[in-house]
Amino acid sequence: MNLEELKDISKTVRQDIIRMIGKAGSGHPGGSLSMVEILVSLYYRVMNIKPEDPWWEDRDRLVLSKGHGCPALYSVLAHKGYFGTDKLVTLRRLGSILQGHPDMKKTPGIDASTGSLGQGLSVAVGMALGAKLKKKSYKVFCVIGDGEMQEGQIWEALMASIHYRLDNLTIILDHNKLQIDGPNDVVMSLGNIKDRMIAFGFNVYDVDGHDFDVLINTLRADNVPGRPKFVIANTVKGKGVSFMENQVGWHGKAPNAEEVKQALIELGGEI
């Protein structure tokens, strides 16, 4: 899939996010829209997967630690063929396979149930360590949120990944700089993330989280032996929808019918 095709699927994913959350009447559009290029890069150009066999033992794993951003992941999984795109409109409905946070027992393609912020990275560390112990070659990718980095369990997992030399682990920070109740720097400053991760011992990349060429090259680059990779993906919360971009109020609010229409017009989708 070439660059233009990746851009097209990203636009479709963004349209899906707006339709899904608008239909459900609840959800998290801001942080779902910000990480679209990250997930599209992983599933279309980076990860070794078999959508027809979701539990293939040697597949690469993805843990969405910021589980509230699952509408983006659900859309990507559907377009990759893990389940039908007709399921997307059932987001958050009782009995749906697409719950408000990822559920590995309900949704094909979900490698870990997440939602309680801070826990997903620990799961990813366990997966990567398990691969080492079993002498498996699969890789583990974990997407975390910057508000989530205020959780103590994240820092314990970071220390463990360095201690166990998990060079099969890539941590991707969706760094949109906003969280549910304000900017990161106001709520709880993260300081200089790059310098802190270098000090921990990570192989660190600081990139534009909406640039496919940079993302794909970074995510596909071989890890330094014995060192996990930490990618700071600088993104825009609400990316692609003008009235949602960089607006903290769209962290966890569903658009109404008129807002859905306006967003879809901007995204070039059918109303």
Image (cartoon, grey):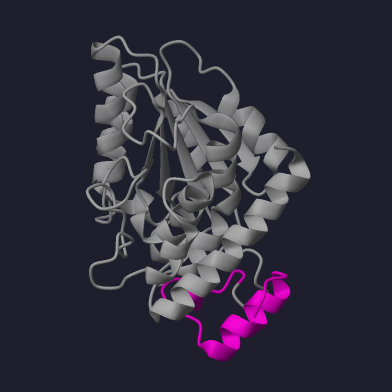
Where is residue 47 drawn, in percent x and y? 50, 30
Residue 83 lies in the magenta-colored region: no
Q: Is residue 101 left or right of residue 82?
A: left
Q: Looking at the rendering, which quadrant does residue 25 occupy?
A: bottom left
Q: Nearer the viewer, residue 40 or 190?
A: 40
Q: In this view of the protein, which residue sits in the foreground, 153 or 72? A: 72
Where is 25 relative to 17, above or below?
Answer: below
Number of numbered tags placed on the structure image? 0
Residue 129 as seen in the image, left or right of residue 77: left
Residue 268, image x and y in percent?
A: 73, 70
Q: Residue furthest bottom?
A: 258
Instruction: Give the x, y percent position of residue 174.
Output: 50, 49
Residue range corresponding to the magenta coloring:
245-271
Residue sitting at x 41%, y 28%: 60
- The residue depicted at 51 percent of the width and 18 percent of the height is 223
If the image is split into quadrants, where does the C terminus sit? bottom right
Q: Up-down: is 223 above or below 151?
A: above
Quarter of the image where the N terminus is located: top right
| In the image, residue 236 above or below residue 157 | below
